[in-house]
Amino acid sequence: MRDTVLFGDCRDTLNTLHGHITTGIAERPRMCVTSPPYYGLRNYGDEENQIGQEQSPEEFIDNLVKVFSKVRDVLTDDGTLWLNIGDSYYNYRPGKGQALNKQSVSNTKQDLPDECPRRGNKLEGLKEKDLIGIPWMLAFALRADGWYLRQDIIWHKPNPMPESVKDRCTKSHEYIFLLSKSKKYYYNNEAIKEPAKDWGTRDRTKGKYHNAGTGLSPHSGLSKSYPKKNKRSVWSVTNKPYKGAHFACYPPDLIEPCILAGSEKGDIILDPFMGSGTTAMVAKKNSRSYIGCELHEDYASLQTDRISTIPNKLPLY
């Protein structure tokens, strides 16, 4: 079972996938790349018990931990989870409940400004205008649940959405967490190395590091040229709107390094929050297969349209 999207609540469809793996109908994904709904920002429809619409951050985190526990159960033993998550602000509005508009495929726009979750009940430990700290709450909870928390990656957005705030900086970053199922896991650092400066062309005969009178060359051992270096943990990736996609679509350039580092050609990439199909599109582009879960069947046509633009590069078995 490859190149498939299972529609329904991922807490149910991941159980279905696990059953298919157990009976031999499906293979295990090598990695998971995803971005779940952010806490309290938007209502994606009429379904009850939506992830992201919980009454407290703790309930939201608990639901995501349960989802990713199911993800861990279906991954290969050397599998990884690459998780993009943003933060939310707390805005207490007594008696007003949640001031969140319903979003659907037909009326969404790319990259709408973040809104504060507005709650009709005061949450213990949070003050109005507090940054909740959702990303690290989730990362620590996943670690406590058994995942290996390997790295935090900063997604720097050169073109962030403007914010009408005057008492803090405009938010221009989100997190990607790399977590692994086991202590030893698949990670291909060569696949995502960056261009390196030529150390051999720099003048090292001057300055405080010059080893005068010692007989040693300045920066001894660093004169060799290296064409590439290990990828750094701050990734500057521009938001690129996709016409027709839902507004929470992350850019393909953001997750391509994740897929290249976390899998090999022919592997299966899992996304339990498939949305408009960005993960599937990038997987296909790089000769991988995909399995997705998506709550809303309305997104099926978007997914098909995006994925159909990529020629089939999968190896023959």
Image (spheres, rainbow, N blue to C red):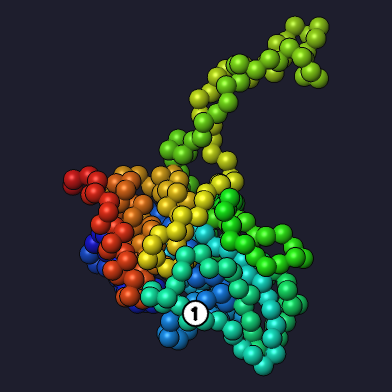
Above/below status of 316 relative to 126: above
Q: Is residue 184 left or right of residue 220?
A: left
Residue 79 appears anywhere in the view: no
Above/below status of 212 relative to 309: above
Q: Nearer the viewer, residue 122 or 276?
A: 276
Secondary structure under tag 1 reads: loop
Residue furthest to the left in view is 317
- Residue in the image at 23% along x and 49% along y: 312
Q: Classify the position of the N terminus by image quarter.
A: bottom left
Q: Position of residue 239 (x, y in %)?
A: 50, 55
Quarter where residue 39 is shown: bottom right
Q: Position of residue 246 (x, y in %)?
A: 42, 68
Q: Which residue is mark 1?
A: 43
Above/below status of 214 relative to 6: above
- Residue in the image at 67% along x and 93% along y: 95
Q: Position of residue 218 (x, y in %)?
A: 72, 14
Q: Is residue 205 left or right of residue 146?
A: right
